[in-house]
Image: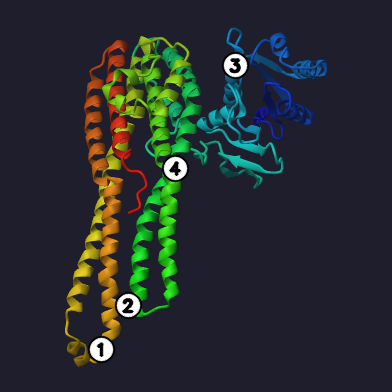
């Protein structure tokens, strides 16, 4: 199902302009509806010259409808004269997104069946923080809004805010830049260089960054969304296994000590059954590896945006770095290479833009990653210590319960305390608390909080060194060398993370 035309709001109240490729179906439907409105206007954005494009429509009636709408357009823009058909259709979807303020997409939710499909267009719109109306192709009454910000206008109505939209639900993982922020970061960096041609270089760099984001963005966001879903499922399931194991111990202890109904043991049976089912299902479906593969893919695509933009490099550095051999069989590696192979030749960035490039690399890449890893290190250490203290508390309470358990019964009688209930409570604590402490210790070891914190702290230090080296860069060539060095560091860190976390599939306890 192709996406519809995009309909941006103009400055005039109630006036809409449809930006549409005029393909059959949804594109033309929206274009016709906009033109029926008072003052409604149409901008035709075509993937190919009109005569060539019309050949893709199977009937004469369809070609006449296309010609009529094209004649009604106030502006016609052709995206590509020389590109292949597949590439032209991919580019036209992105051109529509770039020109619009609001995207209307009629989509069945299926992945793209080729270049330029609705899935790719929607993913690109998300990467550009565009507000979207998603209309279910199977059930048109189901309409989902994404990227809108409630904003009260002077009449009290609800409209679109002029500021950036929030991340859509499928935005990528923590620690990865929201790609919509990169354009703003580049604008903030302009004026930081020197030379008469800096203004022209700044405009060229803006176009260059948009081209790179348009190429890498959809695949990056899709991989990030898949990784986030798999990660959440894997983490919650891992925690549930340890909790249920502790619960099973408590159930059987309570039944035995308090003389509860024999049927209470069904709770233990259920807890163990759920553990076995979750671990079997999770490992069979590969929740753990889905997280790793897609996270790795997203990370490397994100690095690719910076590497391609800053240096013009048109091939990934994956094959050059020995650390990447650890994950050579990863599906993510193959997907990253495919995206890189489809990247158009960019050439070296303009020398006049060196100051802008340095400022952008420093703020948007090096400092962002340094700050992320510094926060990550502190966060992981804090989680490690919280779980460590909770486990230690469980064992201290066990120690106290065991000590009280040794107190002679005559002592309780002396203080007029019911000895049997107290002994029973102490017994269940002596059984359950060590199980809880062991579960917490297992969780701490399973998620490698301390090791991840140490790796992030080390990464922050290395990135700080690279920030210092950046200050000494004097040419675009030197900048390219530093970009390669940074890429090497990033790829090694990602590979080490993949290898370390890859050993932790779902366990039964």
Q: CA distance from mark 1 to mark 3?
A: 83 Å
Q: Earlier in the sequence, mark 2 or mark 3?
A: 3
Q: Earlier in the sequence, mark 1 or mark 3?
A: 3
148 vs 219, nearest the viewer: 219
Q: Position of residue 374 (x, y in %)?
A: 27, 39
In the image, what residue occupies the spot 43% across and 18% down? 340
Task: Name the N-terminal-most of marks 1 and 2.
Answer: 2
Question: Which residue occupies the extreme right position in the image?
Answer: 61
Which of the two labelled residues, at mark 4 and mark 3, occupies the earlier sequence position? Answer: 3
**In this image, 15 relative to 471: left or right?**
right
Please state, as top left, top right, bottom left or bottom right, where the N terminus lies in the image.
top right
User: Residue 380: horizontal and vertical position, in percent?
Assistant: 28, 46
**Circle 4 residue:** 284
In the picture, the quarter occupied by the C terminus is bottom left
- Quick one: SS at disc 4? helix
Q: Nearer the viewer, residue 77 or 124?
A: 124
- Report crowding for label 2: few under 14, some 14 to 19, many 20 or more residues within 10 A (C-alpha): some
What residue would you read off at disc 2?
257
Marks 1/4 in contact by CB < 8 Å: the verdict is: no
Nearer to us of marks 2 and 3 is 2
Determine the secondary structure under disc 1.
loop
Q: Is residue 287 left or right of residue 318?
A: right
Of residues 162 and 272, the one nearer the viewer is 272
Residue 203 in sight:
no
Mark 2–mark 4 CB contact (< 8 Å):
no
Q: Establish if 443 lies above or below 305.
A: below
Disc 1 marks which residue? 417
Q: Position of residue 144 (x, y in %)?
A: 62, 42
Distance in Å between CA atoms under marks 2 and 4: 38 Å
């Amino acid at each position: 199902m192709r996406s519809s035309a995009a309909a941006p709001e103009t400055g005039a109240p109630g006036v809409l302009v449809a930006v549409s490729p005029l393909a059959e179906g949804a594109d033309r439907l929206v274009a016709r509806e906009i033109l029926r409105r008072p003052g409604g206007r149409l901008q035709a954005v075509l993937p190919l010259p009109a005569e060539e494009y019309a050949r893709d429509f199977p009937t004469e009636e369809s070609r006449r409808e296309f010609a009529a709408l094209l004649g009604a357009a106030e502006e016609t823009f052709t995206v590509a004269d020389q590109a292949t058909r597949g590439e032209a259709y991919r580019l036209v979807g992105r051109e529509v997104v770039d020109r619009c303020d609001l995207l209307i997409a009629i989509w069945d939710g299926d992945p793209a069946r080729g270049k330029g499909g609705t899935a790719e267009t929607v993913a690109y719109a998300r990467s550009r923080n565009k507000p979207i109306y998603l209309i279910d192709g199977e059930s048109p009454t189901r309409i989902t809004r994404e990227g809108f910000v409630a904003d009260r206008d002077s009449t009290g109505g609800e409209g679109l805010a002029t500021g950036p939209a929030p991340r859509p639900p499928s935005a990528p993982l923590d620690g990865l830049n929201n790609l919509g922020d990169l354009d703003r970061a580049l604008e903030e960096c302009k004026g930081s260089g020197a030379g008469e041609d800096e203004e022209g270089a700044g405009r060229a760099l803006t176009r260059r960054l948009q081209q790179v984001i348009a190429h890498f963005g959809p695949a990056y966001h899709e991989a990030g969304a898949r990784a986030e879903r798999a990660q959440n499922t894997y983490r919650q399931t891992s925690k549930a296994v340890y909790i249920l194991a502790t619960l099973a111990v408590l159930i059987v202890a309570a039944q035995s000590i308090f003389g509860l109904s024999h049927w209470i043991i069904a709770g233990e049976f259920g807890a163990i059954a759920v553990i076995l089912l979750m671990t079997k299902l999770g490992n069979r479906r590969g929740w753990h590896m889905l997280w790793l593969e897609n996270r790795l893919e997203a990370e490397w695509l994100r690095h690719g945006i910076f590497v391609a933009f800053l240096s013009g490099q048109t091939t990934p550095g994956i094959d050059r770095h020995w650390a990447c051999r650890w994950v050579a069989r990863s599906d993510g590696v193959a997907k990253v290479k495919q995206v890189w192979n489809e990247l158009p030749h960019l050439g070296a960035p303009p020398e006049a833009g060196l100051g802008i490039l340095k400022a952008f690399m420093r703020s948007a890449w090096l400092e962002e990653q340094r700050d992320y890893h510094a926060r990550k290190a502190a966060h992981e250490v804090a989680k490690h210590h919280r779980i460590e203290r909770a486990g230690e508390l469980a064992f201290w309470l066990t120690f106290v319960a065991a000590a009280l358990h040794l107190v002679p019964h005559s002592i309780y009688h002396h203080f007029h305390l019911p000895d049997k209930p107290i002994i029973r409570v102490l017994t269940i604590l002596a059984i359950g608390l060590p199980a809880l402490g062991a579960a917490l210790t297992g969780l701490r070891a399973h998620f490698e909080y301390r090791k991840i914190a140490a790796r992030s702290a080390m990464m922050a230090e290395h990135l700080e060194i690279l920030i210092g080296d950046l200050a000494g860069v004097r040419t675009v060539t030197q900048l390219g060398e530093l970009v390669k060095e940074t890429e090497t560091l990033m790829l090694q860190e990602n590979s080490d993370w993949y290898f370390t976390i890859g050993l932790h599939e779902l366990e039964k306890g």
